[in-house]
Amino acid sequence: MVRVLDRDDVQRLVGMADAIAAVREALVVADRGGAVMPAPFGMYLPDADGDIHVKGAYLAGAPVFAVKTATGFYRNAERGLPVSGGMTMVHDAATGVLRMLIADGGLLTELRTAAAGAVATDLLARPGARSAAMIGTGGQARYQLQALLEVRPIERLTVWGRRPEAAQQFQRDMTAAGLQISVAPTVREAVGDAEVVITATSSTMPLIEDGWLARGAHVTAMGSDMPHKQELDPRILAAAAKYVPDSLDGAADSGELHHALEAGLLEPGSVYGELTAVASGRLAGRTADDELTVADLTGLGIEDAAVAALAFRLAGEHGAGRDVPLGDW
């Protein structure tokens, strides 16, 4: 028998604060050598403007390991279909037996990505930051805002989207979070005085140029997870006091770092350090109010393993999901 969780089960079980705590602990465990995490597999389908990622990991001492597939098909919005999708397979760490299938349409990926963004922002942004800019208006932008509010007392948010009507809808939908939200006509106006900037788009060209950011700003960029994607002018990375990718190899292959290396603006040896090292305290996070800091997140399998293990545990505690004979699959 395999326990199957759907999207509604995950929504009921996994809260943002718990997801953030799980991802933070996974980063620490990984930095201390307690993770098995192969390189991710990814491919891009140009005819459909769609990408597919497969990631997985095992965290030492966990009863399970996880393998996750995630898709992003960016023309689906025009078809009335979800842009993001995916599922997670949770296996017994002692026997390899499939214990759970999380068929949630990629919700765990949304949660773990937002949680990683919150951990990065918590480590690198000013402790009392109250103003933020959100570049992007899709599902991940909404989860990023929810996660951001768990780690910073944001009072003012400016949002920018390619389609003004989408930005206005974001403003209407997210005002319930209890903060002042305004729509900016340009990216430059959105980020100009923001202490925290979050980019959550599928852009293939820089949206934020060098010189646009406020003194002491922090940027968390997570849209660039394939070599053709890009949200930041690579000169921003070169100018940062602390540029922190979640994975040096991953960022060099498909993150913002990929473009900075191609432009000859950075060398791998000049990177401050990976997010795991900052999360564990082996490297310091922000140390001065006027530092420009940048987190470049391409997504880690340990994050998927952590939130999958959390969902697995909570489902067992609450009797969530339904058992399906493995032969029926």
Image (tube, helix red, strand yellow):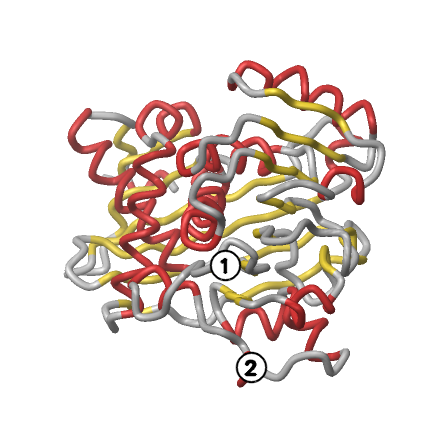
Camera-side residue: 148 or 54?
Answer: 148
Residue linked to disc 2: 270
Quadrant of image for the N terminus: top left
Q: Is residue 65 visible?
A: yes
Task: Provide residue 328's location: percent of width, then percent of height.
Answer: 35, 38
Left or right of 279, for residue 251: right
Of discs 2 and 1, which sits in the foreground?
A: 2
Residue depicted at 15% across the width and 60% down the height? 61
Residue depicted at 72% across the width and 71% down the height? 259
Residue depicted at 63% across the width and 30% down the height? 157
Please tell me in which quadrant of the rendered image residue 14 appears: top left
Please tell me in which quadrant of the rendered image residue 210 appears: bottom right
Q: Amino acid at mark 1?
A: Val
Task: Provide residue 175's location: percent of width, then percent of height.
Answer: 59, 16
Residue linked to disc 1: 54
Quadrant of image for the C terminus: top left
Task: Provide residue 198's location: percent of width, then percent of height.
Answer: 61, 45
Q: Residues within 10 Å of mark 2 (few under 14, many from 20)?
A: few
Tell me if residue 317 comes above or below residue 62 in the rendering. Answer: above
Q: Secondary structure at mark 1?
A: strand
Q: Is residue 293 visible?
A: no
Q: Amino acid at mark 2?
A: Ser
Q: Secondary structure at mark 2?
A: helix
Task: Provide residue 153's location: percent of width, then percent of height.
Answer: 45, 31
